[in-house]
Amino acid sequence: MLVNRCRDIFKSVVFILFFLCTSFSFGQHKKSNGFYRLIDSADIYVSENPEIAQHFLDSIPEPVISNIEGQLAEYYQLKALVSDGLNEEAKKFHYFMLTLKYAKLEENHAIAGMASLELFYNTYINKNDTTAFKYLKDAKIYYTLDNNTNGLAEVMQMPAYVEFYKTNYKKSNQLILEHLEDYKNIKDDGYYYMYALFMLSNNYTHLHDFKNAHKYLNLLKDLKNDNTISLSLHTSHLITAYNCLAEVHLERKAMDSAFYYLLKVRKIGKLMNNADRENHYTFFINYYESIADIDNKNVYVDSLKYLYEQNLKETINASVQINDELLNSEHQLAVETEKKNINRNFILGLLGVLLVVFVIIILRYKTIKKRLQSFSKQNKEFSYLQTNHEKLKVKVHGLEDYLTNVKKDIKQISTISDMAEQRTEIKKLYKNIQNNSTTLLNKGESHIELINELNVEFFNKINSIHPELNHSEVIICYYIFTGFKNKEIAAFLNSSERAVESKRYRISKKMSLQEKGISLVDYLRNI
């Protein structure tokens, strides 16, 4: 009786300590997990509608440092891209600095490479600071660690842009033409080829070689139908190229040609960034001054003045907001530190109680100690035997039994009528299949056959409504419908996250969802 009583006391204390410790960590995880979907939603809209993306990000409550722990790099990357879309340069630089900081902490090499590249561009171009080349070197290191060939291609383009910025147009062309075919052969993302054509067109324009300038400009315009390039990104590069042509024709006093390109910019000028808008207004002022049209000149002088005022106002507001965020972060850090200290002291107190109880048991009941040690030894031996037994069971069942069990699970899932419950069970099954993917693939099990059995109705319906989709696009549609993130889809398909994003954009375009103002996620879930 005495042995059992002491053993029960010891087990109760251990259980209480374990329960309280795990409650703290589980509570924090549960609290944060609910906000991850807001990051995924913002990621969908950030390119074409940054205002909506910002709304999703702003819906994550403070302190974000604990509410989305582990995804802070992606959060600040999206904040930076939103600021870029809204022409908020000061905020963009600030958020990319935070992106790099948390990407390093989270060891997210892909995001660290992208942030380093953006910081290089902003530091060198906007501030003319040669220390920016450290960021370019870091970008190459991070992309190499991530085995990101597309990111390394963009790093390779930066020296050509530096020569362009220094007006060494011939040198810039030489650096681009050496690798032009390499950029063209990157089929999963046409951005790199587009950017190379953009620089070549601008370089030849400044060299007054208009034949080659128009040659590469026409190739650039032809990329409008490339499904891997967003329309807004393509249009923004055309705007800069047309502005460049207008500038050079103004220098040559070819007023009709200059006016022609200024009008082309005005037609598509909705997507102009602040730098292009400033150049556009300045070129119009020079044009109207050259033809002595004072009234129209003054209109653009006023527009340019208003633009400067707005930029100054935005810079001031951004500085105030950044300062408030820093102060708030310091406050939240202090609060979190205080909470951690309280939790730590509480746990240390419990450990002290446990130690006291343990000492009492040792001092008063030596025989109990021996029996507990014997029990512990037997328990370890039993666990060891049980573990080996489980391993042997798995080996005996073999691959064929595993596949049979998977198919049974698939049939069971297909009978679930509740769609939300079905998605949850499917995600669990997918992750199980992903963990055993090497074994499955070696046996030639068809990927499309497996997932077809999960929801035959969905595949029949999507194929009948959208016969233009190929097999890989239908699979991605089903993953999105089921609730997977881009990273998870990329892992299942043994592809890159950026390739999945490009395919999502291509699917939306085939379905004409952008014209209807419907997101791909909402459309598929309605199906």
Image: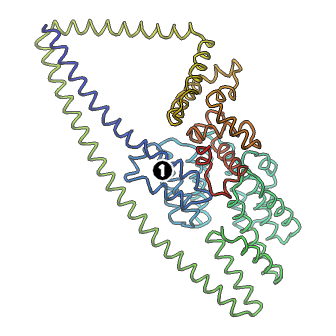
- Compared across the picture, whether 515 is left or right of 99 comes to right
Q: Nearer the viewer, residue 411 or 158?
A: 411
Task: Give the x, y percent position of residue 418.
Answer: 51, 34
Q: Nearer the viewer, residue 31 or 155?
A: 31
Residue situated furthest right in the rendering? 211
Q: Amino acid at mark 1?
A: Lys
Q: At x 74% / y 51%, what residue is drawn?
A: 227
Q: Quadrant of residue 269?
A: bottom right
> Looking at the figure, which quarter contains the N terminus?
top left
- Compared across the picture, whether 168 is left or right of 28 comes to right
- Compared across the picture, whether 162 is left or right of 372 comes to right
Q: Is residue 347 above or below residue 326?
A: above
Q: Is residue 369 above or below residue 483?
A: above
Q: At x 72% / y 75%, what residue is drawn?
A: 266
Q: Nearer the viewer, residue 416 or 387?
A: 416
Task: Give the x, y percent position of residue 314.
Answer: 50, 72
Label 1, on which residue? 101
Task: Give the x, y percent position of residue 525.
Answer: 58, 44
Q: At x 60% / y 63%, what residue is drawn?
A: 124
Q: How many marks?
A: 1
Q: At x 26% / y 32%, what residue is drawn?
A: 20
Q: Nearer the viewer, residue 40 or 188?
A: 40
Q: Quadrant of residue 203?
A: bottom right
Task: Give the x, y percent position of residue 369.
Answer: 19, 10
> Looking at the figure, which quarter contains the C terminus?
top right
